[in-house]
Amino acid sequence: MIDTSWLKISKPGLYVPPAYAHIDPVRAVDTAIITHGHADHARAGHGHVIATPETLAIMSARYGANFAAQQTALPYNQQLMLGDVNVKLIPAGHVLGSAQIVLEYANTKIIAAGDYKRRSDPTCRPFQVEHCDVFITEATFGLPVFAHPEPETQIKKLLEVQHLFPERSIIIGAYSLGKAQRLIALLREAGYDETIFIHGAMKKLCELYISFGIELGSLQTTPIGKIDNQQISLAGKFILAPPSAMGTKWAQRLSDPLVVSASGWMQVRQRAKQGGVELPLVISDHADWNDILRTIKEVNASEIWVTHGREDALIHACSQMGLSAKALSLIGYEDESE
């Protein structure tokens, strides 16, 4: 029998009583094990934070050096005894430093995957498959309709548009942590070596990625506006900005911008139309339906727990595979900004 009585749901989120620790808690707790640096998973104010060195650096960049009273850096595949629980972090492939949390206690291994993806990403370590008894998965794109194309094909579309419209600046809406750096790195892999312009809000995180050895090439903060009464032209240039900046005065200063958005949600055409997106790029930092099912098969767990996302379809698919599955229905984790 698999003993899962030592992992419980509390108001802050998943709680591991024998380790006296929470996983990605949504409110301040004494000890938090953090899967990755996105704000809905990594919050400030905890007494003690355990995460990869990269995630700790991201949290420091976002919240200040004193975001937690105590910090423990746990590199991938190194073990830590937390109370009576053996804890290990392994790559999740989501963003820089993202980790699955491997917990072993009472002859049971539970893996909390956090957010993860299986597609290529030159800016982070690829997802590591490890067998377990219970696998806790997200289901952001947990519906059969979501089948993401290879990111390289989407980058090819982006470069083709630049060639077709050399007189227009190309502004790309992308989340500041993970998606922006991945797009830059994918453009570099495709052979694009010109300066890429970024919104000022992305500068600190891009510099952090570079400090961890991620090659991003020549970047420049976007000089939108006028200098000596002359309009600055960024025709034919790529400009990355957070989605929240796309409709602001900052973006309106661009001359005839071609609006692009990079997200797994761009597979839903209505979302692209509502956002005024001319070129939707289906590039996701989450696993799609097929990759979720592939992952579930590969980890060889007998129980599947779903934390957030499209839970019902995934639970049904697991039952068809002869697996026990249930929804944890945790609140506080967003999927709109992916």
Image: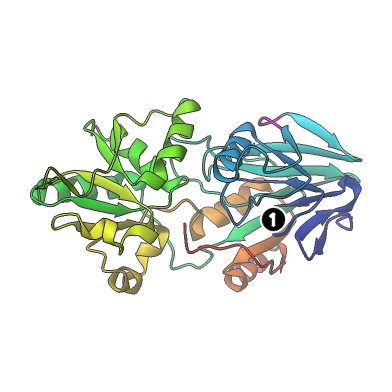
Q: Image point 54% across, 65% down: which residue?
A: 142
| Image-based side of 29 in relation to 237, left or right | right
The residue where tag 1 is placed is 136
Residue 252 location, x and y as percent?
22, 60
Residue 321 in view, yes or no = no
> Which quarter of the figure has residue 128?
top right
| Image-based side of 90 in relation to 58, left or right | right
> Which quarter of the figure has residue 192?
top left
> Which quarter of the figure has residue 309?
bottom right
Residue 157 vs residue 176, the one in the foreground: 176
Residue 316 vs residue 89, the one in the foreground: 89
Residue 121 location, x and y as percent?
44, 39
The span shown in magenta is: 73-77
Residue 116 location, x and y as percent?
56, 49
Residue 65 in view, yes or no = yes
Q: Image point 62% across, 47% down: which residue?
A: 298
Q: Is residue 76 shown in magenta?
A: yes
Q: Image point 72% across, 43% down: which residue?
A: 68
Dot 1 amino acid type: Ile
- Please determine whether, in this image, residue 227 is positioned above or below residue 12: above
Marks counted in the figure total 1
Residue 185 vs residue 238, the one in the foreground: 238
